[in-house]
Amino acid sequence: MATKSDPNYKIIAENRRARFDYFIESDLEVGIVLTGSEVKSLRTGQSNIAESYASVEEGELWLINAYIAAYKQAGVFGHEERRKRKLLVSRKELARLWQAVGREGMTLVPLVMYFNDRGMVKLKIGVAKGKKNHDKRETDAKRDWNRQKQRLLKQG
């Protein structure tokens, strides 16, 4: 992934809730098949991947329920806002993801959608395991303690 100082690198959509709801085991950068009106809409920053997930179906990887707003200037040639979008990944990685989902009970969660250094839309997906409520409370307590610790260090 490109560094944040790169002028072409731009985050389009981020799933901040994913790290709270899931233990992220590993992540993977994948390409995404889009239409022209979808790319134009993404350039304006109108998208949401918070409720979406990735799934291995019929030997291919798909992004399901991701929202990309309609591009008004496209008129009749626009796109469906919540359609299934194909994700591009190597056969080896696809087999690894399929195994993680099927055998190990993992979930494929989109973490961030961005334009890379070449201006291409990329999606970072995480192989994740769901957290229970007590795990979420523990994460919350750790975050609060770290904030409090930082305040104490600033004051002292």
Image (spheres, grey):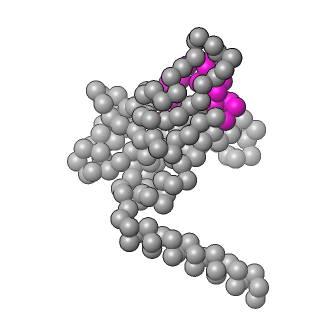
Residue 139 belongs to the span the image colors magenta: no
Please tell me which residue is depicted at 42% across the width and 57% down the height of the picture.
Answer: 22
Query: Hey, which quadrant is residue 118 in on the image?
Result: top right
Residue 38: x, y in percent? 59, 24
Can residue 66 be seen by looking at this rendering?
A: yes
Depth check: give the residue in front, 10 or 15: 15
Res. 117 in view:
no
Residue shown at 59% from the left, 11% from the top: 76
Q: Is residue 108 above or below residue 84?
A: below
The answer to which of 26 and 18 lies nearer the viewer is: 18
Q: Residue 32, percent across and down?
A: 50, 29
> Residue 40 magenta-drawn?
yes
Residue extending farthest to the bottom is: 156
Residue 72 drawn at (x, y percent): 66, 20
Residue at 67% in and 46% down: 3
User: Which stretch did the figure color magenta?
Assistant: 30-45
Q: Determine whether 59 is above or below 73 in the image.
A: below
